[in-house]
Image (cartoon, helix red, strand yellow):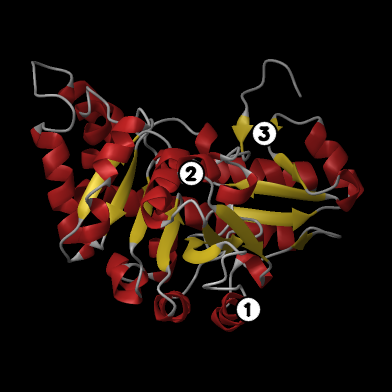
């Protein structure tokens, strides 16, 4: 990498800075004394804003990480002898270091294949039908976890989620969504958040903010209110009940105010779409999946990879080195100049 040249980030939206509106909200919250452990006005106000955004009654719990949101949400839904069905690329299976198994007390993740990072209702139904429900020798079907947007940068449509939820609920399975990039999915679809959550049959949503401009704040949102009752105890036991909860909630409050969460995601999506268009015009390059959120997976020619490797651009190789694949992620602060620079490097 070049020395003394500013780094251009396409490695991850986690590498992006905090949105200024959220930093300002943290500074504003940092005055005086307020009650602790989530009894403060900001935390209560965030839940009320979410009720308006999702157009329903719900329970919402701030946590600090996406892993905590996912595994604690699942821990309420699944017994220790349960099976959680997810896509083979799902973050809960590949990148959470056994946390889902640990916090559920031993539930088994069952990764399944699916084109473009998605599970399909028909194939899921066949698999669950043969999974041995009621047989004491088998883990018992308990939950389906979807990633929205997916790990391939694609987005489930409302009808796709509804069909999967119908398959699950018919057999008494709960439906969870890992929504680390939920805002990107909503912005791409142009739908109401309710259309791809509770109206489609989703029970619990991990609502991401960190990848989209927050410093470190996520939410676990329960649309099935009965399932929320024990979550507070699980959150405390897992050391995610913050005493100074106002600092998580200040981020989330700013994030939800005046549609900031959608504006930030919309910008990232637009930058990704522009970059994908540019890559598709590079001789020998190929975009591997539909670009529907803020992630691009592409196969680049060897000369482009060599130029990229010595540039000031942060990125990740994807798959095996010899495959020539990269993952590029646009963020809320990606600029057109960043895109032009990357395209000049690989062209």
Decide: few, some or many residues near mark 3? Use Cα within 10 Å; few <14, some 14-19, many ≥20.
some
As rendered, which of 116 and 236 lies closer to the eye?
Answer: 236
**For the residues marked 2 and 1, what is the alpha-carbon distance in whole angstroms?**
24 Å
As rendered, which of 321 and 86 lies closer to the eye?
Answer: 86
Quadrant where the N terminus lies? top right
Q: Is residue 126 above or below residue 58?
A: below
Q: Which residue lies at the image location 61% right of the left edge and 73% below the top edge? A: 131
The kind of secondary structure element at disc 3 is strand
Decide: few, some or many residues near mark 1? Use Cα within 10 Å; few <14, some 14-19, many ≥20.
few
Q: From the image, tell me which residue sits under label 3.
A: 314
- Left or right: residue 48 versus residue 198 is left
Q: Locate residue 297, reporting x and y percent.
A: 69, 55
Q: Locate residue 296, reporting x and y percent.
A: 64, 55
As rendered, which of 212 and 340 lies closer to the eye?
Answer: 212
Q: From the image, tell me which residue sits under label 2.
A: 105
**For the residues marked 2 and 3, what is the alpha-carbon distance in whole angstroms?**
38 Å
The single residue placed furthest to the front in the displayed view is: 136
- Left or right: residue 127 versus residue 168 is right
Q: Is residue 230 above or below residue 200?
A: above
Q: Locate residue 332, reporting x and y percent.
A: 44, 43
Q: From the image, tell me which residue sits under label 1.
A: 130
Q: Is residue 176 visible?
A: yes
């Amino acid at each position: 990498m070049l020395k003394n040249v500013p780094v251009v980030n396409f490695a991850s939206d986690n590498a992006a800075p905090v949105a200024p509106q959220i930093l300002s909200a943290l500074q504003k919250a940092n005055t005086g004394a307020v009650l602790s452990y989530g009894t403060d006005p900001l935390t209560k106000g965030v839940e009320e804003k979410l009720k308006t955004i999702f157009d329903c009654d719900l329970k919402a719990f701030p946590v600090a990480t996406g892993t905590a949101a996912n595994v604690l949400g699942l821990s309420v839904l699944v017994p220790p002898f349960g099976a959680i069905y997810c896509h083979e690329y799902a973050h809960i299976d590949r990148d959470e270091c056994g946390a889902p198994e640990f916090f559920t007390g031993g539930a088994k993740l069952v990764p399944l294949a699916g084109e473009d990072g998605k599970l399909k209702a028909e194939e899921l139904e066949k698999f669950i039908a043969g999974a041995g429900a009621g047989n004491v020798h088998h883990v018992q079907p308990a939950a389906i976890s979807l990633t929205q947007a997916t790990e391939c940068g694609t987005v489930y449509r409302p009808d796709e989620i509804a069909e999967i939820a119908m398959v699950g609920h018919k057999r008494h399975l709960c439906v969870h969504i890992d929504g680390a990039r939920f805002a990107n999915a909503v912005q791409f679809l142009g739908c109401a958040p309710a259309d791809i959550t509770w109206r489609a049959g989703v029970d619990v949503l991990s609502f991401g903010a960190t990848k989209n401009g927050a410093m470190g704040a996520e939410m676990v949102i329960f649309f099935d209110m009965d399932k929320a009752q024990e979550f507070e105890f699980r959150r405390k036991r897992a050391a995610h009940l913050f005493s100074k909860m106002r600092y998580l909630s200040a981020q989330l409050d700013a994030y939800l105010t005046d549609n900031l969460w959608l504006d930030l995601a919309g910008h990232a999506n637009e930058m990704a779409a522009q970059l994908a268009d540019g890559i598709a015009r590079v001789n020998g390059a190929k975009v591997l999946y539909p670009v529907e959120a803020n992630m691009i997976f592409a196969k680049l020619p060897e000369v482009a990879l060599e130029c990229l490797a010595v540039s000031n651009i942060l990125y990740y190789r994807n798959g095996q080195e010899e495959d020539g694949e990269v993952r590029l992620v646009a963020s809320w602060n990606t600029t057109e100049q960043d895109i032009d620079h990357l395209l000049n490097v690989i062209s």
